[in-house]
Amino acid sequence: MIVPLEHVLVLALAVFLMGAGCALLRRNLIMILLGVEIMLNASGIAFVGSSLAWRELHGQAFVLFIMGVAAAEVAVGLALVVYAHRRTGRLDADHFSKLRE
Amino acid sequence: MVQSAAILALILPLLGFVFHVAAGRFVSRRTVETAACAAILGSLIGACLALAAGWGQAGSVTLFPWFRAGDFAASFDLLLDPLSLLMAVLVGFISLLVHCYSVPFMRGDPGYIRYYGYLNLFVFFMLAVALADNLVFLFLGWEGMGLCSYSLIGHWFHSGERTAAARKAFLVTRTGDVAFLIGVALLFAQGVDPSVSSIQAQAASLSGGTAALLGLLLLWAAAGKSAQFPLLVWLPDAMAGPTPVSALIHAATMAASGVYLLARLFPVLALSPTVLLGIGAVGTLTALWGAASALAQRDIKRVLAWSTLSQVGFMMLAIGAGDPAASMFHLIVHAIFKSLLFLAAGCLIQALGEEHDIFAMGGKLRHRLPHVFWPFFFGVLALAAVPPFSGFWSKGRVLSAVLAQPGAGYTALALAASAAALLTSLYAFRLLLLAFFGRSARTDALRPESVPGSMSGILWPLALLCLMAGTLDLPGHWGASNWLTGVLASAPGLPHGPEGVSEALVALLDSALALAGLLLALLAYGPMERFFPRIPEGARLWNLMARGFGLDGTYERILARPYRSGANLLWLRVEQGLLETASSGAAALLGRASSGVRLWTTGRLSTYLLMLLAGLVLILLIAAGMRS
């Protein structure tokens, strides 16, 4: 592998932190879902990098799994978002706090 | 033949009960009523057949063994001797009339399946008491009657007063039943197989002290069921049930069962003269007590209830005088006239729209309800022991049995019993005069048509029997020769009738007492009322008598109230005060402790995500730290 593993991991960490920041700081439900997707892909980058560095295929197989799970998660998540929007007309995450009571 | 007929007599009411429970709600009301009456009719026929087929001889039959524990064995077995079969016939007869009477009386009552079911079960348990040989089997019937009386007295359970009466009957009779159980255990400990037949055979082997103790225990048990002196408080309140139930309880089942038990186990009692005297004293005291209380009642059913106490007292007295045959004679006669009086009272109450007060009844009833008046009149004559009605013969028989016993104790009992007989006649005629001859009648509510012929028709056979039943045991000098005594004497352990008493003298005394009562009642409540100072209703003594000499109130004060306040103390102080404070205090403590953690539940998604991430980082850090 021509790119050193450290560089890949730093990239993955940076993408992960960006995704986490997006999920934490944004209030829009869609943006939070987007942040979660980015975090998942960051872990995918780390998996592929380590897979290439150690010449193990498990990591790449994992990434395929993550993609599948992420697709399903987005489908369910977006459906929830659409439903929540239909019910209340809003997408603000802080607005949905009924579970607290 | 005898065996199968007796088994049939016993089982049919139970089958009736099972039918009502299992199928009652799927069939019509008419079917339920017919089934209930048919079960009892079959039972009566079975009992009659058994009595006729096994005339004068004792037999026994074991249905099947019940349980066995070590040396102790209990089985369902019947002892068929003249005493038990006669009792079974009596129970069947009275119950049949009560069942038939119930059909018109309980028309329109929605709880009829429960009613007929318990009525049949009641008869089954009473027949079990009458026929059982094994005392544990007998105890089953004994307790079962308690259960059925509880359910039937509280039949209209929406009224708190009625359920209280049912509860009281249950608890008070239970107090007596404990003694029965102890008695069975004592017998077993003495090596006597606890069954009627072996007691009759082996009673003589018991030591004097044991026999006396056993006799006292049996007396206590009988006092509970038959409502004798210390335990008499439940019977007047048991009026809360439907009137046919009162008739059944008072005439042939509950109240009679205590006396019957004593007559059945008489060989044990006969061993101890002291116990016999004690039984006589309890009976006499109750007879006086009940008669005096009956004199002051206004509620027609209460008059009859106190009268039952008093009459059962006479039966006890006969047992105490060592003459169970006289006791059984009076029991049979009393069953006939008391059921008649109760059933007639039920007719009156329905005709007047649930009016119980005898002062609200009056002369109009006599003309408007002749089919109730005449049987009632016959019943009153029998109760007051006016010759030649049956009560005259049986009460005379009891009195002569007492007089036949030597000793000052029995002389005193005879005097007291004579006073009770006078009071009996007095209250019986007071009841008659007020209810059927009174002037101050509030009879606007009178609806004679609400007493169908099927109700009043049942009174007539009983009324005739009131007149005729005395012939069962006419004393020797009247030509007949104590038929009932002769029959019962063939049962083991029952002695022959009284000897050496001038029966003519007793008859004279008895009829003089009855006529004196009639005269007094006529003076106080009859047409001469104006010329005679009426017994002041509302005077102190009168109030005392109306409350049954305050025995009920005394129990209320010394037993029920302390118990209730103790229960209240446990409820308010211990349960609510201590336990609930402790548990709610613990809950408050936990709540306060967790209030800091509760702040984290903001309901904001980002907070949760942040915490998730923080937790993840923490776990990773720990994992990394553990690795290095």
Image (tube, rainbow, N blue to C red):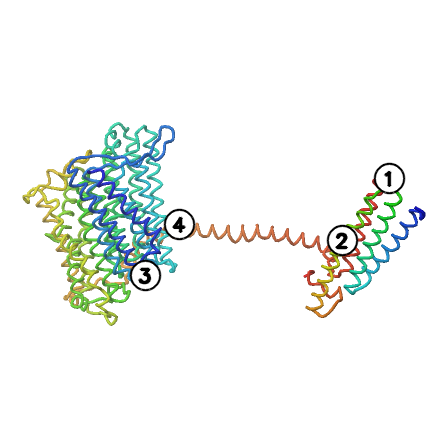
Q: Which residue is mark 2?
A: A68
Q: Amino acid at mark 2?
A: Gly
Residue type at mark 3: give it: Asp
* Pointer 1 residue: B628
Q: Nearer the viewer, mark 4 or mark 2?
A: 2
Question: What residue sits 28% from the left and 54% below the top?
Answer: B245
B424 or B246: nearer the viewer: B246
Disc 2, SS: helix
Which residue is tagged 3?
Answer: B109
On the image, the x and y values in percent for residue B412 come to: 20, 43
Q: Position of residue A56 (x, y in %)?
A: 84, 42
Q: CA distance from mark 4 to mark 2?
A: 82 Å
Give the camera-side residue of A47 and B52. Answer: A47
What's the CA distance linking mark 3 and mark 2? Answer: 72 Å
Mark 4 and mark 2 on one chain: no
The nearer-to-camera label among 4 and 3 is: 3
Using the rendered image of the protein, determine whether residue B18 is visible from the camera's viewpoint.
Answer: yes
The residue identified by callout 4 is: B558
Q: Earlier in the sequence, mark 1 or mark 3?
A: 3
Q: Nearer the viewer, mark 1 or mark 3?
A: 1
From the viewer's perspective, is B492 left or right of B144? left
Neighbour tally class for label 1: few under 14, some 14-19, many 20 plus, Cα within 10 Å: few
Q: Using the rendered view, name the quadrant where residue B262 is placed.
A: top left
Q: Is residue B13 left or right of residue B423?
A: right
Do we see residue B412 in this rendering? no
Give me the C-alpha separation between circle 1 and circle 3. Answer: 87 Å
Please state which of the two labelled residues, at mark 3 or mark 2, is closer to the viewer.
2
Task: Measuring from the top left, give residue B12's x and y in whole percent.
Answer: 27, 46
